[in-house]
Image (cartoon, rainbow, N blue to C red):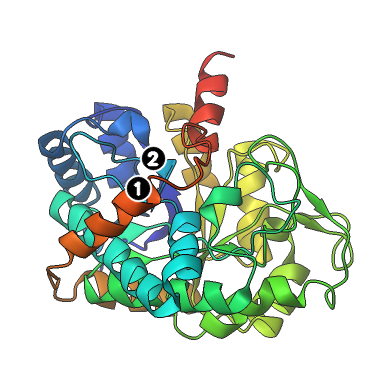
Amino acid sequence: MPKPVLSAMLSCSGLELTDAEKRIFAEFNPLGVTLFGRNIATPHQIKKLTAQIKEAIGRNDVLIAIDQEGGRVRRLHEPNFRGYMAQKQISEIAESHGLETAKKIAAAHASLIAEDLYNLGINWNYAPVIDLCRPQTSRVLASRCFSAAPETNIALAQAMLDAYQNSAVCPCIKHLPALGPAEADPHLELPVIRQSIKELEKDFATAVALAGQTPAAMTAHILLTQIDSRQPATQSPKVISEIIRRLIGFNGFLISDAIDMRALHGSLAIKTQLSLDAGCDAVCYCGGTEQGLVEVCKNSRPLNDASRSRFEKLRNIITGQHKTVDIAQIYKDYSQFSANLKNYDKEYDATEVLHLMTSKQ
């Protein structure tokens, strides 16, 4: 009888698996592994690492994920990999060249990234970002959003979702229910959002429109005081059931944002348990330490029936046929245009900054 799949996306410490990581992956059978900058060197090295991960876990449906949004949040960097625009730059193409042109660029963006990932053995991208860009939106998020207009967000995100799924790479929208209104950076502290649900309807609009068409979504570490004044959304049964599942209508696979973030308090064990108890299908652990891996695994649980059903939809995507589209030139033309647009603080990647801070403690 196959070993149950554990409700955890784990991580690893370096450019190849350690013996301890191999043992942990084999013993606990996690949902998959997320790659970060510390795991990236060359295409050959990444292919070897993803093969090691799949061999260690021993399933053909292991999820290997990455944050390859474009702009400053991209784990695969030049010169070994193609460069990609920030989502905000694609939105500005909509303003200057029209929405239909921007939709083609958004589809090209996702298709080219999917081709890069597929060739490396990576099958899940934590993208696109669907949060509205508000005046107060945190520095960590602003350039990663498309627009302040829900209709633009919906059109460009839909183009990306379709392109990823047609390329056998699973997309994961983020962040639910919404991170755009947050002024604080959840990597460093818990953002508190005091608006009513009525006032946040515009922020939810993109997620509502895409709820039935996206296979996976990532939570936002935010405190919605008008719904649950005690627990962050990721750990709030009320927010997940009433807002994400019912109001927004999302019934896909829901993964927590990184439980390492300082927005969440307590040990890894507590963070894992509270997130799963609240209704997340899986937790995402990014730290990659042996102790952390064991703690998360021992406090996770097998996917339940509903989560397995949602996971099956992800499996159907990643085992599908990868389609190559010859669109590199059109994307190159517009990315050169976008180089003349505003620079969006492209060196500030908060997840990697957090890892660096943690490693120095």
Q: How many discs appear? A: 2
Most foreground residue, 142 or 254: 142
- Answer whether residue 128 is visible to the viewer in this image: no
- Answer whether residue 85 is visible to the viewer in this image: yes
Question: Label 1 vs label 2: CA separation?
Answer: 5 Å
Residue 205 in the image, given as x and y percentages of width and height: 65, 79
* Circles 1, 2 touching at the beta carbon (< 8 Å): yes
Location of residue 254 with respect to 68 vertically, above or below: below
The type of residue carrying mark 1 is: Val
For label 2, the residue is 11
Residue 181, image quadrant: bottom right
On-image quarter of the N terminus: bottom left
Most foreground residue, 267 or 346: 346
Residue 119 in the image, given as x and y percentages of width and height: 13, 54
Location of residue 135 with respect to 296 vertically, above or below: below
Sequence-wise, the earlier of marks 1 and 2 is 2
Mark 1, other Cα within 10 Å: few <14 / some 14–19 / many ≥20: many
